[in-house]
Amino acid sequence: AVGSAALSEVPILQLWVLSAGRMSFDGFCRYLMSDENTPVFLDRLELYQEMDQSLSHYFISSSHNTYLTGRQFGGKSSVEMYKQILLSGCRCIELDIWDGKGEDQEPIITHGKAMCTDILFKDVIQAIKDTAFVTSEFPVILSFENHCSKPQQYKMAKYCEEIFGDFLLKVPLESFPLDKAQPLPSPNDLKRKILIKNKRLKPEVEHKQLETFKQLMEGGESSSPASLLDDEIEEEIENVDQDEEAHPELKFHSELSADPISQEKEVHVNSVKKGTITVEDEQAWVSSYTYVGATTNIHPYLSAMVNYAQPVKFQGFQVAEERNIHCNMSSFNESVGLGYLKTHAIEFVNYNKRQMSRIYPKGGRVDSSNYMPQIFWNAGCQMVSLNFQTPDLAMQLNQGKFEYNGSCGYLLKPEFMRRPDRTFDPFSETPVDGVIAATCSVEVISGQFLSDKKIGTYVEVDMYGLPTDTIRKEFRTRMVMNNGLNPVYNEEAFVFRKVILPDLAVLRIAVYDDNSRLIGQRILPLDGLQAGYRHISLRNEGNKPLSLPTVFCNIVLKTYVPDGFGDIVDALSDPKKFLSVMEKRADQMRAMGIETPAVIDNSARQIFKDHLNRHMSLDYDVSSEGR
């Protein structure tokens, strides 16, 4: 194996042996490992998709508990996490906001009473402004988990207004009013805009309270004007997102119960301070806390800033369809979301054509692990929120998927997941109407610079997509011992015989050592995958490029053909070859003294014509080898 380090920096074209009309050995090796021979079409890594459709027609890269650097209990909150996650292209981030203590009464961001550290809300808002539109110009959605009193909500709103300035979308666009049946604006319409997702008052209540508040401000009230609005009853909230209250799985945004802290609880608190958190500590903490949802007592000044991301209580798919308000959205923890997928899969897909949904991890994931996002992408859920601080398989799939389209954080959903006149069942096992199924095979030939140690290595090849397309832990090479530099696997091709929905499928190639530790991996969406002999550069578990390790593979992509029709497809793919075979047979017959001009001129062509007619009735497109 020849690595790029052994080759010069001379441009590829200069490595051609022009006089012989051939490429030199070094030039050929360099070409195989160059950008010209990447496993994905380079235009897929640039902004190539249409960005003028409704927000609900896109998958949106989304983060859960964005501020945490690690575990959900006793963890550290960091302003830097917001910067790094936005710079990665994420477009929906979460802020858990609580009343600050002390004289300054500054709103803080923390994980409830989960013994996590605090950071100032205003510092986070400044960090968001600084990094929101560095990687992507498309809109950022701030998902507020708002636990603040009205006075501190007013502070929140003022910070957003003053720090974000023109970035903040405070009022709806004139061409996209918040009316029934009115589609959401597009990412292009909302370029360089920040949207706030927070519960909102009923319009008439918001107007009344806002007028009252302005009068109090103009009157120069010395006491906090926001506190004078606290007598408004909670029933005046129109869009209350009560998913978490309705499904009492603990999502650790919690208050202490009314009972005094017991000595046992104090022990756990002290252990957190000492940095010696145990599983028993976490279990005791979970059992001693009760869920308290985000406040429904909303300040009108903050409420008025909410427009295209209005969380509402989910009352069923039929109710949502009848209301037909596209700016309404609901959140579901992973367990509730899976429940709806089991019972109302097609309705869930149709809901996501019209309005947005957000999925987040269930409360039991104290270790900040992630659920598998693919099942929710299959249903068209836009904001599939993950713990970005955890570099597990779920995050690798997320980062690999959103690397496409210029890492802008928005990916256009397939057409059948957008059109109201199409029906799609994400659990279907038959080809989707209008979509051509594919066959993908991967031959793992060798590895390069996997490790500088004499270790054993093997390669796994998995496919993730629709349930019927997903194949895991089935394809694995043999172990090559004592060679981390250039192991040769030479495996027979791993064949994914029938991928019924290539647009949603991704290929994962992962290399492990003899202790089953991950050396490197790569996520490759099938949409944009290039066939042929390719050096696949590996990433680490956090999806950061590794400088040298590659896997050399032969990838073959074909249109799926049912059993028994292979010869027909071969004839259609190469009709000249098919006819030349017939002519060769005619020559052999002539050698036996049989004259066959009629056979060649008539029979062969008639057979080919019959094959063509039969094949066309199958409605398979076989004119192209790849996608």
Image (spheres, helix red, strand yellow):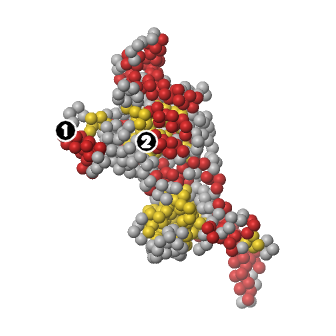
* Sequence-first tag of 2 and 1: 2
The disc at residue 262 is 1
Q: Say which element carries label 1.
A: loop
Residue 413 drawn above or below residue 544: above
The disc at residue 541 is none
Question: For mark 2, what is the residue?
Answer: 78
Q: Quadrant of the N terminus?
A: bottom right
Q: Is residue 324 visible?
A: no
441 to the left or right of 241: right
Q: Residue at x 42, y 29 (%)?
A: 199
Outermost left residue:
263
For badge 2, the amino acid type reads: Ser
283 to the left or right of 549: left
Outermost top residue:
219
Q: CA distance from mark 2 to mark 1?
A: 30 Å
Q: Say which element carries label 2.
A: loop
Q: Residue at x 63, y 44 (%)?
A: 50
Q: Quadrant of residue 297?
A: top left
